[in-house]
Amino acid sequence: MSALPEELWRRILEIGVQRRGFSYKDLCCLSISSRRLNRLSDEDFLWSHLLSSDFPPFFSPSSSSITSAHSSTCKSLYKLRYERDRDKKIAAHRRAVLRKESQVLERSMRLRDMETRLAEETNKMRATLAELSNLSNVRQASVALNVWQPEIIRGRQKQIVEQCVVPIESRFHVLQMELKLCKQQILGLEKAHIDEKRRLALVEEELQSMRYHPLRDQKPINGGEVEFNIKRKKLKKFHCPGREP
């Protein structure tokens, strides 16, 4: 490796960058392998090609003239553009997470509303069943009285029934219709509750995957976090654009 001249190494790096075999990460890795490659990987023609290929709208003759006036290297410009692009991606990711969180909140509220309506319909069905049972007992008692009681008592009962606002038979049929309607409402709400619960679980899973970070979510083992931070501090002095602060 040391026997190869710098011109050959420079040509190798140039071909690798032009044919997109080398990315900015590869140049950063090469820069920490030796002093010679650190010097060669910092040359402007390499980073100029990466800047024009990775960020075409940013790199133009006018922008290059401005940067030359400010005596900025292409590597520093690449780092600046990379950080801006990274910040945009982070902001877009945060907005996507917020939208997903709002969807979770909306579906959770909808699910609680369905549970409330389901409880109300269940209580209504129980009340209807209780009233229907009482009316059924009244009908049976009325039939028994009509059979066994004298004519005078049956006439008195007929007057009492006629004085009622709603006849027993009509009320009985109304309650049967209400019971049937309550059962249909409960079946529909239960089905909608199951579907909404499944959608909520799917949205929560998507939100969890969006929040997941492979390095941040790992717990340190035997001081591994401290060792990782030390390595980051050592590599930070090379100012690689791929390294986050």
Image (cartoon, rainbow, N blue to C red):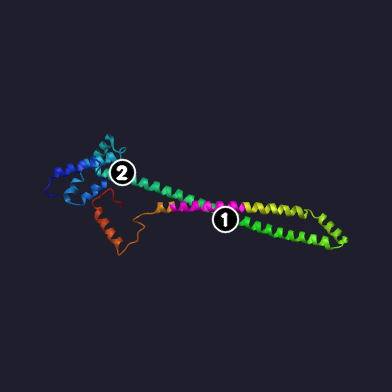
Circle 1 is placed at which residue position?
Answer: 115
Which of the two marks, 2 or 1, is nearer to us in this view? 1
Mark 1 Cα-neighbour bin, 10 Å: few <14, some 14–19, many ≥20: some
Distance CA(mark 2)–CA(mark 1): 51 Å
User: Type of residue at label 2?
Assistant: Arg
Which stretch did the figure color magenta? 185-205
Give the structural element (helix, strand or loop) at label 2.
helix
Give the structural element (helix, strand or loop) at label 1.
helix
User: Type of residue at label 1?
Assistant: Glu
Residue at screen point 28% across, 46% down = 79
Q: Residue furthest left?
A: 3
Q: Are marks 2 and 1 in contact (CB under 8 Å)?
A: no
Residue 89 in the image: above or below residue 65? below
Mark 2 Cα-neighbour bin, 10 Å: few <14, some 14–19, many ≥20: some
Residue 96 in the image: above or below residue 136? above
Residue 148 in the image: above or below residue 85? below
Left or right, residue 148 beside residue 205: right
Q: Is residue 191 magenta?
A: yes
Instruction: Tell me the number on the disc at residue 171.
Output: none
Residue 166 in the image, given as x and y percentages of width and height: 77, 53
Q: Is residue 201 magenta?
A: yes
Left or right, residue 2 beside residue 29: left
Circle 2 is placed at which residue position?
Answer: 81
Specify whether residue 208 is in view: yes
Give 234 or 152, whichever is nearer the viewer. 152
Q: Residue furthest top?
A: 61
Residue 174 in the image, given as x and y percentages of width and height: 72, 52
Residue at screen point 17% across, 51% down = 35
